[in-house]
Amino acid sequence: DAKTTQPPSMDCAEGRAANLPCNHSTISGNEYVYWYRQIHSQGPQYIIHGLKNNETNEMASLIITEDRKSSTLILPHATLRDTAVYYCIVLNYGGSQGNLIFGKGTKLSVKP
Amino acid sequence: DGGITQSPKYLFRKEGQNVTLSCEQNLNHDAMYWYRQDPGQGLRLIYYSQIVNDFQKGDIAEGYSVSREKKESFPLTVTSAQKNPTAFYLCASSIVGQGPGEKLFFGSGTQLSVL
């Protein structure tokens, strides 16, 4: 599975959009991009996933570049409760969820 | 409410002692997983099971054992052979065969420390 690169940390003002980048330049055609987040001392929580089209749900939007080598997770109106570590992961279609590789992610700090 | 329950929240192990971490789910999920997380690090897969009475080793299975006698339960035993057991342990479950929409549901974790 392709490797991802994320900045180790980011800050965001409360109420503003948080844009979290992820680089996955070696992604292959059948690999999906997943985003999870982990609030301190809790288990990770699924946010969103996509293949090549932009996706939106009640939590966030996922923007994937046309060449699929990078993506951005957007939290449109960040709140203090969005402070967490955000993981960007790629996985083959049909691949076992056990093969999701949770790296160090991006620690997002939302500030008042 | 449906979900995954891990217990205890905190656990202490003495030298040479085996300890068992509990994981129960009522989501009717086929697959269950155990991960280990060290401070400031990502998650590493210890064991996983996709069906009752069957399980596979993950990346760091040495010093750990599991059983899957019931669909709802996947206990993890940290044996005395695990020389550095202090970590945050996370249990997860998922539906098998759902395709790309399949996602992991996690418990709230158990913090294991050595006395």
Image: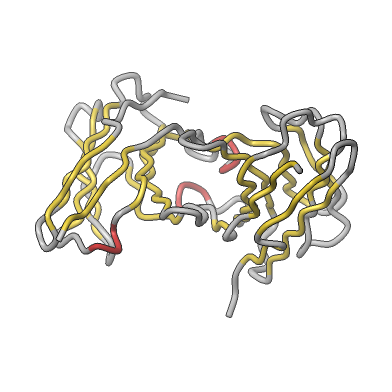
Determine the residue located farthest toward the top in the rendered image. A26
Q: Quadrant of residue A34?
A: top left
Q: Quadrant of residue B11?
A: bottom right
Left or right of B38 in this view: A64? left
The residue drawn where x is 9% and y is 57% is: A16
Q: Quadrant of the C terminus of chain B?
A: top right
Q: Quadrant of residue B62?
A: top right
| Number of numbered labels in the structure image | 0
Left or right of A15 in this view: B39? right
Q: Quadrant of the N terminus of chain B?
A: bottom right
The residue drawn where x is 71% and y is 63% is: B7
- Where residue B113 appears, as percent x and y from the top left, is 69, 45
- Where residue A23 appears, as percent x and y from the top left, is 27, 27
- Where residue B79 appears, as percent x and y from the top left, is 86, 38
Determine the residue located farthest toward the bottom in the rendered image. B1
- Where residue B78 appears, as percent x and y from the top left, is 81, 41
Left or right of B16 in this view: B34? left
Name the one closer to the observer, B92 or B85: B85
Q: Is residue A48 above or below residue A100?
A: below
